Amino acid sequence: MTGITILLVALVAVVAVGLFLKTRNGAVRATTAASGTTNSRLELLSSAGVSSPNGGPVVLHFSADWCGPCAAVRRVVGQVVMSMADAPRPPVEIELDIDKEPALAREMSVLSLPTTFILDGGLEEQFRVSGVPSAADLKAALVPLSGPHEPKSENSG
């Protein structure tokens, strides 16, 4: 009887963890960097060719030839970036092969593929997506970063 109880507890635990991970898959999650982007991360991003030529957001996604879902991410990101081409600061898409940029993947804590980052114009991480994002969620995260830089007035009221 003890064996069956242990088996049922283990089964419940596995199902709970699976459901938790499923809810996070494809979700665009805001990230908070306490100290901003480190110099080592900026150097790795620069050496990998990651830049924001127009000061707009960068959609950086890690992929690999052997990653099936990465093709879906490529389509979703491409579609969203094209739809925002007329934005004041349109997003830039950059895809990096995790096998060719392992140091940057380690620095950015990429634990699974596909993983997508939304970086602001200063290349600071704003959002992170594990899995395939929906086009609507991705666009909703990019729109505020693609707008004009308007100084905020102290007396705007």
Image (cartoon, grey):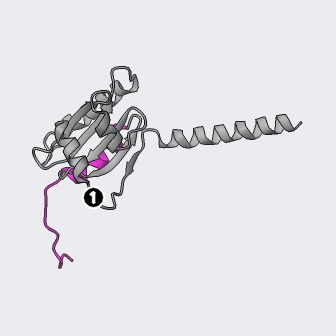
Three-letter code, disc 1: Gly
Query: Vertically, is 13 above or below 147?
Result: above
- In the image, is residue 6 part of the stretch drawn in magenta? no
Can you say which quadrant of the picture contains the N terminus? top right
Q: Which element is circle 1 on?
A: loop
Kindly identify which residue carries mark 1.
36
Query: Vertically, is 154 above or below 9?
Result: below
Is residue 108 found left or right of 22 in the rendered image?
left
Image spot of residue 99 (x, y percent): 32, 27
Image spot of residue 101 (x, y percent): 27, 32
Q: In this rendered view, identify the residue nearer to me: 134 or 119.
A: 119
Is residue 110 found left or right of 97 in the rendered image?
right
Tell me which residue sits at (13%, 67%) in the image.
151
State which region is magenta: 134-157
Image spot of residue 37 (x, y percent): 26, 54
Q: In this rendered view, identify the residue nearer to me: 5 or 27.
A: 5
Can you say which quadrant of the picture contains the C terminus? bottom left
Tell me which residue sits at (38%, 32%) in the image.
114
Instruction: Determine crowd level at label 1: few under 14, some 14-19, many 20+ residues with C-alpha closer than 10 A.
Output: few
Q: In this rendered view, identify the residue nearer to me: 73 or 49.
A: 49
Tell me which residue sits at (59%, 38%) in the image.
18
Image spot of residue 77 (x, y percent): 28, 34
- Quarter of image, res 109: top left
